[in-house]
Amino acid sequence: MSVLVFSDAQTTATAAATLVAAQIIQKPGTVLGLDGTKSLQPVYKSLKAMTANGLLNWRKATLVQLTELVRDDGSQPIRGHMDEALYGGLSLGEGQLLIPYGAPGKWAECCRRFENDILDRGGMDMLLTTVRPDGSLLFNGTQEDMAPITHVEMWEGEKTITAGLSTLMAARQLVVVMTGAEMAEAAREAIQGTVSTRVPASLLQLHGSAVFLLDEAAAALLV
């Protein structure tokens, strides 16, 4: 695990985008896990700009969207946000985007298929994510008993489908972005706190290739 601290949120986002870009350049066929949390939008904006400037080619990459909201009407709100934030600028072909979604009512089958699709592609090479202020990851809440792989989870009154902690930890490299003063306590718990499922982000300490990128505000409580 390593921790990098930058002066402000934009510089942190640019640094995270640079790490992702280096991975794509080094391995064009990268399998890249992506957190759809809106706080990562500055990172995606930087990647989209690099692509528009001809610096990145995503033709061989596979993007793994790690969450989606469960809607009986078949809509995919997080996919819609990510289309605007990133996907729409990458000219992705068929099969390049994996999303944990399927026919309404068949969520167990959907979860299994999503996990198998990742494995069929050799697993995730890199995963870009953030931590919520309460220390949770994706839609994996702060409870003692949690599902390790992709599963359906209630989150703030909504049904969601989310990659589990084992799915995240199986990625070969983790890039974790945390910015803003409201993230300071979560950053301390994630990086220097006791490892516990009550603070899911603390489990990232156990990953051998996790890189935390923080701005000074988020790093204020680190010692």
Image (cartoon, rainbow, N blue to C red):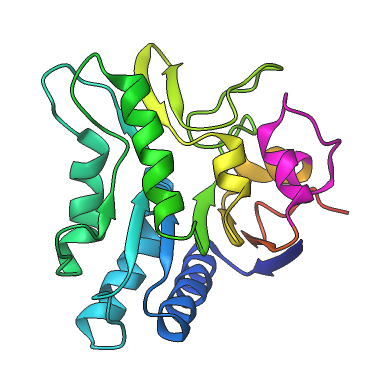
Q: Position of residue 179 (x, y in %)?
A: 57, 53
Residue that sits furthest to the bottom in the current view: 54
Quarter of the figure with residue 76: top left
Q: Position of residue 59 (x, y in %)?
A: 23, 76
Q: Nearer the viewer, residue 214 or 76?
A: 76
Residue 101 vertical position relative to residue 178 in the rendered view, above or below: above
Residue range corresponding to the magenta coloring: 189-207
Q: Position of residue 183 (x, y in %)?
A: 62, 43
- Quarter that holds the C terminus: bottom right
Q: How many marks?
A: 0
Quarter of the figure with residue 112: top left
Residue 95 vertical position relative to residue 56 in the rendered view, above or below: above
Residue 199 vertical position relative to residue 7 in the rendered view, above or below: above
Instruction: Assess whether residue 169 is covered by the magenta stretch.
Output: no
Q: Position of residue 20 (x, y in %)?
A: 46, 71
Q: Nearer the viewer, residue 94 or 145?
A: 94
